[in-house]
Image (cartoon, coloured by chain):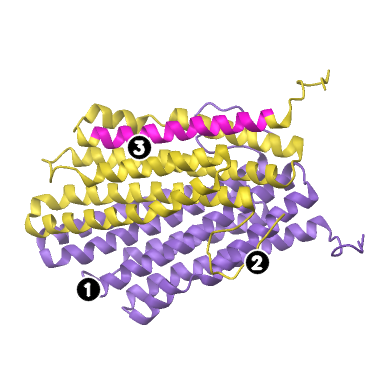
Chain colours: A yellow, B purple
Amino acid sequence: MPDSSGPVVRHFQQELDELKQRLLAMGGLAEERVVAAVKALVERDPAAVRAVAEGDAPINRLHLEIDTRAFTLLALQQPMAVDLRAIVAAIKINSDLERVGDLAVNIAEASARYLLHPPVKPLIDLPRMADLAQSMLRDALDAFVRSDVTLAQAVLDRDDLLDFLKNQIFRELLSYMLGIPSKIEPSLDLILISRHLERIGDHATNIAEDIIFMVSARDVRHMGAGSPPFLP
Amino acid sequence: MPDSSGPVVRHFQQELDELKQRLLAMGGLAEERVVAAVKALVERDPAAVRAVAEGDAPINRLHLEIDTRAFTLLALQQPMAVDLRAIVAAIKINSDLERVGDLAVNIAEASARYLLHPPVKPLIDLPRMADLAQSMLRDALDAFVRSDVTLAQAVLDRDDLLDFLKNQIFRELLSYMLGIPSKIEPSLDLILISRHLERIGDHATNIAEDIIFMVSARDVRHMGAGSPPFLP
């Protein structure tokens, strides 16, 4: 119904869909930045590294815009049940994605230091970690938009592989560090980068858990913590 | 007003106060676990380390309970403006505190590995980082309960000192690693612990930013990202 004192009252589902689309765009940006950071590292391209380290303004703007949309929807529409959970999930997912953007900056900063040294080794497992973290993030967001619990669960299942790769990278780099002192400092940065990628996977996991809660009102966090099922 | 079909309808402000009290209890638990982890490391007490690594069930239960309370309040009471922002802030703060609890586990796990080696050095700066992170966390939660923007701002201002300590620890440990190969592996765990403490400070910072938004509807995140002020 049009209201002469303010903007036209839009249909709630349309606003909610737009919120989801903006969140997808945010996810796309976050993914891109992670991929760009690791590509710049592998290709030893300092200009590309710098571009990632200094390029977080667009994602930060989107972060604020999405929060504004979500709070406005909550305040003006007073949604119930699944819609309420979807909007609160959007606010939490938005935070997670913003931190993924920050982690891309952290990866770029560690890469900039790494490029000051000769290569420690050919980088194989770090790009694998990046691909895996990226696909977890993408699937988590698809699961949000499609309310797809099965896809969200598949994200949770991949976290172990990311952990495995991180440990493998750690063991390999440790052996380089023990053997060749000049490799200690650059190896440290590669270890830090692997931890940043692991944390991106953690954020994808957080998002997947929020989606399962949103869709089914079933809390899969802390399974075994003895909580009753909950429906608001 | 009593309702024969359900529990007595409690006054909204009373429910909101109780939510805040539970969040304070959650914060207290998270703080305690961080302090216990670092104390166990400094005192080289493997049993105490293990107790922290395995003791996250209570905080996880509280995490679920607080989310349940917050979603129930949102769904049943349909609060407006500052109360709405307070409840959404509580949900986000709850996530942050749960991750602080996870970081205490990470600190304990790295400490357990560290204790397998002779000490690298007397630990001075790590306990300082832990004290600082703990006080940031405590002040952020006090700021939440008292809606105190000034206190929240003071939390943000302390993050630089945490960063400074982290960098100092890194440089010092790097010099040990370069000089004495047997110190490489345990030094790596101390570096990881300093990163975990830095992240606890990041969570305190997130909480402080959420409080400033909650109280003033002023978004201090990404200052300069070019966003308009927002009031739902």
Can residue B151 be seen at all in this image of the molecule? Answer: no
Q: Nearer the viewer, mark 2 or mark 1?
A: 2
Above or below for B204 versus A31: below
Can residue B14 be seen at all in this image of the molecule? Answer: yes
Q: Give x and y (percent) for residue A164.
A: 29, 57
Mark 1 burial class by Cα count in 10 Å: few <14, some 14-19, many 20+: some
- Asked whether A18 falls inside the magenta stretch, the response is yes
Q: Give x and y (percent) for residue A113.
A: 22, 41
Q: Nearer the viewer, mark 2 or mark 3?
A: 2
Q: Which residues are magenta?
A: A14-40
Q: Residue at x 19, y 32 (%)?
A: A43
Q: Residue at x 63, y 33 (%)?
A: A68
As helix, strand or loop, the secondary structure at mark 1 comes to loop
* Residue closest to the far left: A180
Q: Say which residue label 2 marks.
A: A228
Quadrant of the drawing holding the C terminus of chain A: bottom right
Q: Say which residue label 1 marks.
A: B119
Q: Residue at x 37, y 65 (%)?
A: B107
Q: Give x and y (percent) for residue A162.
A: 33, 52
Disc 1 residue type (three-letter): Pro
Above or below for A69 versus A152: above
Q: Say which residue label 3 marks.
A: A34
Q: CA distance from mark 2 to mark 3?
A: 38 Å
The answer to whether A189 appears left or right of B37 in the picture is left
Mark 3 burial class by Cα count in 10 Å: few <14, some 14-19, many 20+: many
Chain of the residue displaying label 2? A
